């Protein structure tokens, strides 16, 4: 947020979920906590990451947390994340900003940290990060094999069809991100 609070939300603005012309990085926490989000018949308030982490830890629910960086937050976002080190134990961190992902790995060396590769045109960057999260439409066999050779875990997103999930399971990817849990067999642990 504009006042350096970490919140849990996917979009960078509130147009789609709240019909408001507000950007997260230009709004304060006191403004955002009053907003109600609506989607698919459900409504919710925007939670602070600290509250969300506390509940996930209480439930022993592991999280894959994406740190979304904007030009306005790039300089300060890791300073906001650093005090949460103890609460982040057992969770994974990732970012679509390679510099931020590398800095997170330096800041939290014991945590698994990854880079989200949205479009593979030139191959995955060489990093010492723990995993790459690759967009499914570019997760070809050559790329998966190259990352396996580097001993980097691979996650693939979004995978929303049973056949596509079966192919990636056969290729031994470390994780599949989906919007449709019904693509997995009922008795399989995820």
Image: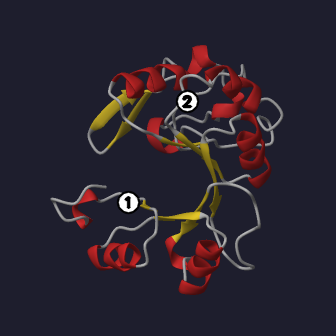
First of labels 2, 1 by sequence position: 2
Confirm whether residue 1 shows in the render.
no
> Which residue bears the numbered disc 2?
88
Relative placement, left or right, of 190 versus 177 is: left
Structural crowding at the residue carrying mark 2, measured as other residues with C-alpha within 10 Å and reported as few (<14), some (14–19) or many (≥20): many
Please name whichever residue, 119 or 186, is drawn nearer the observer in this view of the structure: 186
| Quarter assignment of residue 106 | top right
Residue lying at 65% horizontally and 22% vertically, measured from the top left:
5
Q: Is residue 155 above or below residue 5?
A: below
Q: Secondary structure at mark 1?
A: loop
Q: Secondary structure at mark 2?
A: loop
Structural crowding at the residue carrying mark 1, measured as other residues with C-alpha within 10 Å and reported as few (<14), some (14–19) or many (≥20): some
* Quadrant housing the C terminus: bottom left
Relative placement, left or right, of 113 versus 3 is: left
Residue lying at 31% horizontally and 76% vertically, measured from the top left:
166
Q: Is residue 112 above or below residue 86?
A: below
Q: Is residue 5 above or below residue 93?
A: above
Residue lying at 42% horizontally and 59% vertically, measured from the top left:
177
* Quadrant housing the N terminus: top right
Q: Which mark is residue 178?
A: 1
Q: Residue furthest right?
A: 75
Measured as percent of width and height from the top left, residue 102 is found at 76, 48
Relative placement, left or right, of 163 versus 144 is: left
Measured as percent of width and height from the top left, residue 30 is found at 59, 13
Q: CA distance from mark 2 to mark 1?
A: 23 Å
Q: Are marks 2 and 1 in contact (CB under 8 Å)?
A: no
Measured as percent of width and height from the top left, residue 171 is found at 43, 78
Please name whichever residue, 37 or 133, is drawn nearer the observer in this view of the structure: 133
| Quarter assignment of residue 139 | bottom right
Measured as percent of width and height from the top left, residue 18 is found at 46, 35
2 vs 1, front mark = 2
């Amino acid at each position: 947020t504009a006042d350096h609070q970490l919140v849990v939300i996917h979009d960078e603005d509130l147009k789609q979920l709240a019909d408001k012309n507000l950007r997260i990085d230009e709004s304060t926490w006191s403004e955002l906590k009053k907003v109600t989000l609506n989607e698919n018949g459900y409504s919710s308030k925007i939670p602070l990451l600290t509250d969300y982490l506390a509940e996930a830890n209480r439930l022993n629910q592991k999280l894959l947390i994406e740190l979304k960086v904007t030009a306005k937050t790039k300089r300060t976002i890791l300073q906001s994340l650093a005090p949460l080190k103890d609460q982040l134990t057992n969770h994974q961190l990732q970012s679509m900003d390679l510099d931020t992902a590398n800095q997170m790995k330096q800041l939290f060396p014991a945590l698994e940290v990854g880079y989200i590769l949205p479009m593979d045109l030139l191959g995955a960057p060489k990093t010492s990060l723990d995993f790459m999260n690759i967009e499914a439409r570019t997760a070809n066999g050559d790329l998966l094999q190259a990352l396996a050779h580097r001993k980097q875990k691979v996650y693939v997103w979004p995978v929303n069809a049973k056949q596509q999930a079966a192919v990636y399971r056969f290729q031994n990817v470390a994780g599949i991100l989906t919007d449709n849990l019904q693509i997995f067999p009922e008795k399989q642990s995820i």
